[in-house]
């Protein structure tokens, strides 16, 4: 395969070209998928103890390249030094834990005589077997970690993988994938596809030789893939509008600290970022003031100009900044009270806090993927639950209260995949279940859950 065209990858921090990736054609995609099919026939028959050794080697190699990959993440997706390094180290841990987990997952025997009419001479041996060729599609915001969270469980299960990184993030994602290849995976077991989704996206998700799709990205694209893929099984992590529900008995200092950390880290460019605060009126004034004070501690700037830890950095591209700015301007026009921020320089938007946001404003419902946080005041716990559940999304929510009995009652009523009690919404640790309901996803991720998702049960019934 020789690519005839290439895509320039520009840094969101400097607008300079930092690398190129092939703009692959449909013929290129066909070739890579055919190699994966051939590689799968070899890989699925390798003993598990051999497959896990490849993963251990990749984890070691990843740490050896920590400095290089950290630098690339900063340049390509605009992360600060601390966040970029953390992603590399966390990914190495994820890969090692995936290997450990796979070694301790077992099949099952089911005796037929436990069911009325069954006889003692019949029993079923249940195994998890690989599905085939897995299409793994990763997003820009965690191009290493969210690539590995798909690739490692798929490979250790005996599948072959065709990896399609987001165009912005494809240098970092390809760096990781090449480490997998470097440790000696059989030919074709892991293939890398790069190119514009508008040109090859539909072709690859509807390809007759793709057996499973593992996608992280926007709900809009996820819905489109689900329609196009038809009967192909899916595992999807999509958008969110995660709410922090604050009750009148909450520890407001703790609450404000977690809300600010959850809303503004990496400029809010995370599906699990806190994207709205729903607070009862009794403590709304005090909480708003405490959030505002906490926001003064945020470090804002460009990672290529300022060393160290930064919370708010330039957004990934101009279109993202335009979208966030539009939400801010609409909230102003409709009467929301701007408490701080709201300024823009290039793609850098200062951390922005609005109070008195109402449900007729886009900011109450749309996912900004940027550093803007609305406060929605409510009269009761019941109203807070109603507004939280009215969202099309259902990824995570936080509940802040000092009454644990009440916290569990509220948590049970929230229509989300995960509820955090007295903590910010967040992904991880990576072995915990991670899922969304409604428009936030399909299936369950997390190391053991991902392994199970990318295998199928095969039952062999023995008759003695």
Image (spheres, grey):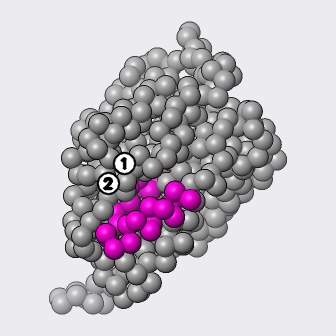
Residue drawn at (49%, 73%) of the image? 252
Q: Is residue 391 above or below residue 100?
A: above
Q: Residue furthest left?
A: 117
- Along the horizontal axis of the image, is 61 left or right of 248? right
Neighbours of disc 1 within 10 Å: few (<14), some (14-19), many (20+): some
Q: How many marks?
A: 2
Q: x%, y% of residue 239?
A: 37, 48
Tag 2 near tag 1, CB within 8 Å: yes
Quadrant in the picture for residue 222 = top left
Answer above or below: position of 29 versus 251: above
Residue 332 as seen in the image, left or right of residue 310: left
Q: Mark 1 — residue?
A: 337
Element at label 1: strand
In this rendering, is residue 22 above or below 126?
A: above
Q: Which stretch did the figure color magenta?
A: 273-293
Frontmost residue, 56 versus 445: 445
Q: Residue at x 31, y 69 (%)?
A: 281
**Percent x, y of residue 336:** 32, 47
Residue nearest the viewer, comparing 118 with 6: 6
Residue 458 visible within the image: no
User: Crowdedness of circle 2 by 10 Å Cα count: few (<14), some, many (20+)?
Assistant: some
For disc 2, the marked residue is: 356
Q: What residue lies at 44% left-to-right and 84% top-to-bottom?
A: 402
Q: Position of residue 9 (x, y in %)?
A: 60, 22
Is residue 283 inside the magenta stretch? yes
Main SS of the magenta segment?
helix
- Name, please, the residue furthest toward the top: 4
Mark 2, secondary structure of its residue: loop
The image quarter containing residue 80 is top right
Q: Is residue 90 left or right of residue 368?
A: right
């Amino acid at each position: 395969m020789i690519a005839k065209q290439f895509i320039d990858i520009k840094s969101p921090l400097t607008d300079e070209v930092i690398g190129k990736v092939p703009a692959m054609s449909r013929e290129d995609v066909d070739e890579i998928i055919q190699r994966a099919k051939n590689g799968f026939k070899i890989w699925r028959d390798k003993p598990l103890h051999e497959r896990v050794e490849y993963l251990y080697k990749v984890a070691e190699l990843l740490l050896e390249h920590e400095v290089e990959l950290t630098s690339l993440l900063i340049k390509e997706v605009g992360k600060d030094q601390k966040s970029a390094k953390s992603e590399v180290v966390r990914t190495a841990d994820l890969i090692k834990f995936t290997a450990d987990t796979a070694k301790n997952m077992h099949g099952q025997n089911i005796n037929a005589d436990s069911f009325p009419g069954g006889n003692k001479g019949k029993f079923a041996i249940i195994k998890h077997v690989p599905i085939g060729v897995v299409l793994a599609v990763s997003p820009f915001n965690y191009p290493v970690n969210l690539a590995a969270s798909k690739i490692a469980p798929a490979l250790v299960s005996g599948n072959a993988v065709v990896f399609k990184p987001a165009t912005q993030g494809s240098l970092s994602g390809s760096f990781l994938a090449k480490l997998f290849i470097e440790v000696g995976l059989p030919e074709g077991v892991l293939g890398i596809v790069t190119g514009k989704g508008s040109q090859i996206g539909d072709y690859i998700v509807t390809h007759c030789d793709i057996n499973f799709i593992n996608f992280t990205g926007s709900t809009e694209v996820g819905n489109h893939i689900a329609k196009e893929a038809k009967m192909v099984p899916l595992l999807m992590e999509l958008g969110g509008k995660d709410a922090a529900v604050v009750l009148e008995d909450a520890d407001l200092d703790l609450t404000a600290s977690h809300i600010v950390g959850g809303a503004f880290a990496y400029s809010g460019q995370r599906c699990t970022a806190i994207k709205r605060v729903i607070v009862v009126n009794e403590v709304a004034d005090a909480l708003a003031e405490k959030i505002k004070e906490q926001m003064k501690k945020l470090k804002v700037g460009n990672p290529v100009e300022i060393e160290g830890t930064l919370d708010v950095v330039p957004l990934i591209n101009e279109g993202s900044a335009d979208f966030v700015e539009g939400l801010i301007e609409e909230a102003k026009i409709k009467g929301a009270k701007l408490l701080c921020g709201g300024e823009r320089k290039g793609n850098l938007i200062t951390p922005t806090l609005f109070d008195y946001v109402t449900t007729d404003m886009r900011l109450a419902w749309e996912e900004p993927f940027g550093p803007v946080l609305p406060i929605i005041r409510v009269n009761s716990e019941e109203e807070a639950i109603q507004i939280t559940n009215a969202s099309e999304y259902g990824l995570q929510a936080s509940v802040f209260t000092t009454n644990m009995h009440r916290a569990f009652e509220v948590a049970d009523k929230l229509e989300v995949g995960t509820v955090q009690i007295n903590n910010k919404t967040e992904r991880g640790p990576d072995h915990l279940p991670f899922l969304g309901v409604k428009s936030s996803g399909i299936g369950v991720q997390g190391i053991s859950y991902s392994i199970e998702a990318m295998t199928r049960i095969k039952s062999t019934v023995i008759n003695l």
